[in-house]
Image (cartoon, helix red, strand yellow):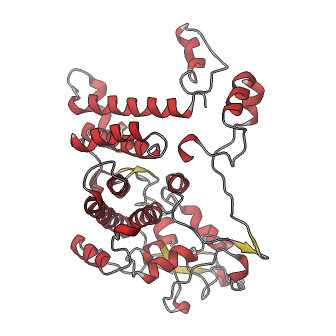
């Protein structure tokens, strides 16, 4: 995509040359540039300090910085954590560069987001229960969407996952049984006309993800993400420690995921009602006490989540997929494409599998072919066309 020349349109402000037809940079070159920029940013932030007495603008950084309130050390952790993510993203197609970056981070103890207290999240400052990130979840449930997926639901139920009641909601008529909706249409029960389809399928918890001002409105990367990336790097031998280190990072990732979701759930309202009159339904929050970190580790060890070296990579990918869920859905989809894990159930309809292919990239917009045709045509030729089924460079 246009990258190195993409912002020259603004050069007119500075009486500099303007290029309205930027070249398309190769994906490898873009990733190389991003990794270099992140390393340079982290190196700068290693020693950077604020001098509000000399520079008055710096005195209000704590209010202008909506993510870290002007704490530069937390920005340093973010730069290194994103560098780790981008390095792992290219680890299958450029192992040398990926290993160089990740080894530098780990061996030199570069600060990372490895505790939930340092998560790169943006929260909602509005003191109203109608402004949560997933406010729309509640109305979608009323319209018949947002059911719990049967595959994830079955995994969580089988392992007594403490995140189950936070992720999904089931009504009293269903006696607390969490049933996920199968992906295949022919496997689904007939859905009633009830506004929440009670007694049939569980659905994404609107108290957690809907009317909850404590829910982040954006997550760039968090501690669980970082630990799952480190677990994968150890499993693949990119960093030292092998399966012993992989298991430790993996367990810590699950632990932090559980604690983060309990913290989000703690700010959810006690009740919430959708609809009105005869169609009204009130959701009631279940009283949940967050397990201790030690209790989480004990639970993991006694479940099917317990790390198994033979199946370690699949386990790491599954937990990453479950943790990112809908809060980091773009990242979740990118990692699903990269790892090709977890292996999701086939969607069968009338004997045909419907999900044998899925989008691998965002096609170039038609405006690009109209306004930047020479560079567009060269890029399309270099990437074997403009179809959404053509994988991006790191996904081969």
Residue 173, compared with residue 112, is above or below; it is: below
Q: Quadrant of the N terminus?
A: top right
Depth order, front residue of 184/94:
94
Residue 274 left/right relative to 232 = right
Where's residue 227, x and y in %? Answer: 32, 56
Residue 282, quarter of picture: bottom right
Q: Nearer the viewer, residue 174 or 153?
A: 153
| Residue in the picture at 72% in, 30% down | 368
User: Is residue 206 positioned above or below 5 on the image?
Assistant: below
Which residue lies at the image location 78% right of the left edge and 27% below the top edge?
A: 370
Residue 98 coordinates in the image, percent (x, y) = 39, 40
The answer to whether residue 304 is left or right of residue 169 is left
Q: Observer-nearest residue: 14 or 247?
A: 247
**Residue 275 vertical placement versus 255 (above, below):** below
Q: Position of residue 158 (x, y in %)?
A: 44, 83
* Image position of 371 with respect to 68: above or below: above
Residue 69 visible somewhere in the drawing: no
The residue positioned farthest toward the top in the image shown: 15
Q: Which residue is found at the position 48% from the left and 88% from the top?
A: 176
Position of 100 with respect to 21 (left or right) is left
In the image: residue 305, left or right of residue 176: left
Is any atom of residue 292 visible in this view? yes
Location of residue 86 in the rendering, given as x and y in whole percent from the top left corner: 43, 42
Number of numbered discs visible in the structure rendering: 0
């Amino acid at each position: 995509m246009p990258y190195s020349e993409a912002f020259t349109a603004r050069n007119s402000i500075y009486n500099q040359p303007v290029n309205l037809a930027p070249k398309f940079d190769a994906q490898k070159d873009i990733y190389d540039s991003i990794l270099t920029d992140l390393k340079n940013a982290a190196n700068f932030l290693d020693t950077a300090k604020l001098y509000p007495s000399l520079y008055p603008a710096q005195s209000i950084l704590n209010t202008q910085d909506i993510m870290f309130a002007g704490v530069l050390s937390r920005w340093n952790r973010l730069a290194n954590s994103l560098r780790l993510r981008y390095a792992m993203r290219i680890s299958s197609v450029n192992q040398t560069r990926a290993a160089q970056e990740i080894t530098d981070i780990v061996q030199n103890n570069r600060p990372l987001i490895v505790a939930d207290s340092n998560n790169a999240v943006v929260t909602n400052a509005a003191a109203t229960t109608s402004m949560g990130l997933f406010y729309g979840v509640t109305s979608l449930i009323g319209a018949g969407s947002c059911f719990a997926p049967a595959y994830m639901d079955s995994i969580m139920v089988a392992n007594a996952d403490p995140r189950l009641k936070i992720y999904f909601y089931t009504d009293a008529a269903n006696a607390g049984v969490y049933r996920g909706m199968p992906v295949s249409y022919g496997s689904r029960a007939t859905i009633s006309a009830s506004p929440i389809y009670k007694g049939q399928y569980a659905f994404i918890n609107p108290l957690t993800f809907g009317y909850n001002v404590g829910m982040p409105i954006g997550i760039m990367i968090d501690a669980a993400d970082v630990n799952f990336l480190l677990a994968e790097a150890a499993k693949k031998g990119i960093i030292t420690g092998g399966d012993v280190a992989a298991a430790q990072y993996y367990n810590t990732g699950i632990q932090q995921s559980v604690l983060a979701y309990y913290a989000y759930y703690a700010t959810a309202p006690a009740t919430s009602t959708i609809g009105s009159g005869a169609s009204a339904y009130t959701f009631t929050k279940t009283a949940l006490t967050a397990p201790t970190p030690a209790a989480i580790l004990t639970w993991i060890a006694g479940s099917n989540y317990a790390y198994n070296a033979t199946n370690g990579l699949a386990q790491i990918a599954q937990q990453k997929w479950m943790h990112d869920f809908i809060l980091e859905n773009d990242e979740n989809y990118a990692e699903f494409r990269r790892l090709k894990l977890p292996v999701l159930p086939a969607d069968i309809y009338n004997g045909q599998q419907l999900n044998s292919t899925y989008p691998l990239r965002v096609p170039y917009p038609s405006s690009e072919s109209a306004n930047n045709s020479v560079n567009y045509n060269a890029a399309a030729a270099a990437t074997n066309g403009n179809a959404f089924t053509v994988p991006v460079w790191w996904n081969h």
